[in-house]
Amino acid sequence: MGLLRPPLSLLLPVQPAHGIPGEPQPGAPGCDSEQRTVRLPFLLLPPLMEWIRVAVVHAEHRRSLLVDSDDVRQAARLLLPGLDCEPRQLRSECCFQSFKCLDAAAASGKFHLDLGFRMLSCGRADLVQQAARLLGADGINTMDDQGMTPLMYASAAGDEAMVQMLVEAGAHLNLQVPANSLRHPSVHPGSRHWVALTFAVLHGHLCVAQVSAKVTPLFEPVWSHSWLLNSVSPLAAAARGNYEMVCLLLTHGADPLLRAHHGTSLTPPLFEDMNCFSYAAAHGHRNIVRRLLLQPPHRKEDILSLEEILAEGVEEPEDPTRHPAADSLSAVPSASKATMKALQQAAYYSAEHGYLDVTMELREMGVRWKLHTWLESLRRAQQLGRNQVTLRLLSDFPSIRTEDFSPELLSAGIPFLFSLLDYALTKQLASLVSHCYGGSPVPALIVSALLPDIRFLNNKEMSDVTFMVEGRPFFAHRVLLMSASERLIGSDLTGLVINRFVSLLLQMVMRSLYCGGTDGLKILPAEAKKLLPVAFFFQLRGLQRCCEVMLSQSLTLDNAVSVYQTAKHHGAAELCRFCEGFFLQNMDQLLDREDFHRLLLATPPGSGPDQDLPVLKHLETTLIDRLYHLHHLLSSTKRDVIHLNRITE
């Protein structure tokens, strides 16, 4: 392929104001007057060969013999994150370098062709005849290298006056973009067999479509064998979201079942044989699906498939699981087999793209469930939290025929159904339990305040007990220790060496003892979690309660399970009850966490009468106590109000 190397200014965007060393700065001699100042998102640019490779790919994609500036801009869009450029115009600027490889006659014909297209694009009616003579024997119906006529360009641009002028001058509306042809080497693969109306519809030009639809009848298209290739009818293009365009085309006789009529085994497997209903459903446009259904059929099927021949005369039984809605088109009185087949395909695409409401409305119209469509709809309903739709889908499962079952049911369906069973029931019960517990705060833990006395903390005077912690002595008093801790009563405390706890923790323990409480003790949540086992080991009730209060105040969804397990292991009953209340109040959110699931399903060790109760049993007891307390409080308040009313009377 002859490659015209683009200039360096197009390949390498200009740096910011500081510029590139060695390059001329804006305003310097030899610098172009128009400098592009593109802010680069990174310091290092891709290598030049990478630019050339990507630009050549774009040129080959549009069947071009050379690389132009737009190919370089498209390469910049891919190679430089954060940059963008306008889409390529249908008719790009002519590059005269390509004429050098042609002989005089061919080059003259190319120049005449280009001049004729330019004369027609200016919109002057007095130049139509001169332009037609320049274009050759086909006149204004001549095609360029991209296989497009002046009418197609005008339709794509939305120039209504130009379209009207070309139609009056004899332009053919039914001319199609050709397939592979030596005369048209730059035909885009996606636009093959398109007509001028297709370009107008795709660009949303309603006025241009009205001009084209009035001239050409649509219900008998002249696209001979265009359905064998990847072509899109104007109605299918409009069904993707342009409701007014759909109404216009249907009014002028467009056939919504065009692809369904021609969708045979000859269709290439690489292209999806989608009909207008499928396009509308895949984009979630219920109003377009309804409008397409209102269109009367054009003709009776004259070509039947083997399946339809075998099913001829067999009436399908009435589906008892249908639930028609009042505002839907469930009552389709004369839906043909072709229509039902098209709706079946539309249900598949709506389920694939996640439009649950469209799928459910198609079900109300009488479309039978296919296993894949049903599974995708059920999964989408569960994701959206549509409980009523989920229950309805579950009740519709018996309507799926057993011969429609596939390996997907075993690989994805059954596991999802079991997960749905666990998730749906548990979430509903968790929401109910949280509602019963109420939104009022969990009863807080209270610490009793005592008078502080810190004079003898780690004081050698009058000390009769010495602890050795981390190689350093810590002085204490036997009477105070025995009165505070039941564990130390009767123990020999002389020269006791403690290796289990660090010095900081022991100092906090002694501070709580000599202060007579924990009022002056500042404990962080992380320290409280480490100090709780120490207080439990020495049986220091006040310090243990202080740690419980601190941990209860810092309880979150992230640490609730670990705090509860610590409290359970070290006998912090009040903290356990607080955590259980927190679980009940936030169970709906906690069920999304794996550690809470393991806590609920864990089996307590042991089998004797002293075996600890499961967590669910503790939660049940806590909820009963909470409801009893609230009910008793409400009853007492109600009795007081009644008594007060009687006194005032």
Image (cartoon, rainbow, N blue to C red):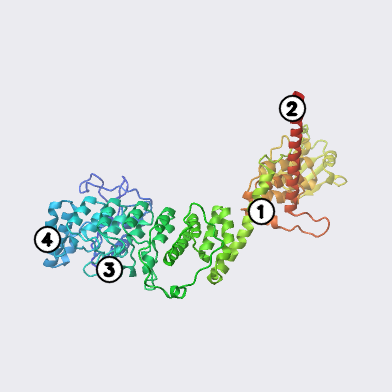
Q: Badge 3: few (under 14), some or many (20 or more) residues near its Cα, within 10 Å? A: some
Label 4 is placed on what type of residue? Arg
Residue found at x 70% / y 45%: 581
Q: Earlier in the sequence, mark 4 or mark 3?
A: 4
Q: Which mark is residue 633?
A: none
Q: Badge 4: few (under 14), some or many (20 or more) residues near its Cα, within 10 Å? A: some
Q: Nearer the viewer, mark 1 or mark 4?
A: 4
Label 3 is placed on what type of residue? Ala
Q: Residue furthest right?
A: 490
**Residue on which the image places disc 3:** 179
Q: Badge 1: few (under 14), some or many (20 or more) residues near its Cα, within 10 Å? A: some
Q: CA distance from mark 1 to mark 4?
A: 82 Å
Q: Residue furthest top?
A: 648
Q: Secondary structure at mark 1?
A: helix
Q: CA distance from mark 3 to mark 2?
A: 92 Å
Label 2 is placed on what type of residue? Asn
Q: Earlier in the sequence, mark 3 or mark 2?
A: 3
Q: Nearer the viewer, mark 1 or mark 2?
A: 2
**Residue on which the image places disc 1:** 596
Q: Earlier in the sequence, mark 2 or mark 4?
A: 4
**Residue on which the image places disc 4:** 133
Along the line of sight, which residue is nearer the eye, 79 or 236? 236
Label 1 is placed on what type of residue? Phe
Q: Earlier in the sequence, mark 1 or mark 4?
A: 4
Along the line of sight, which residue is nearer the eye, 9 or 604? 604
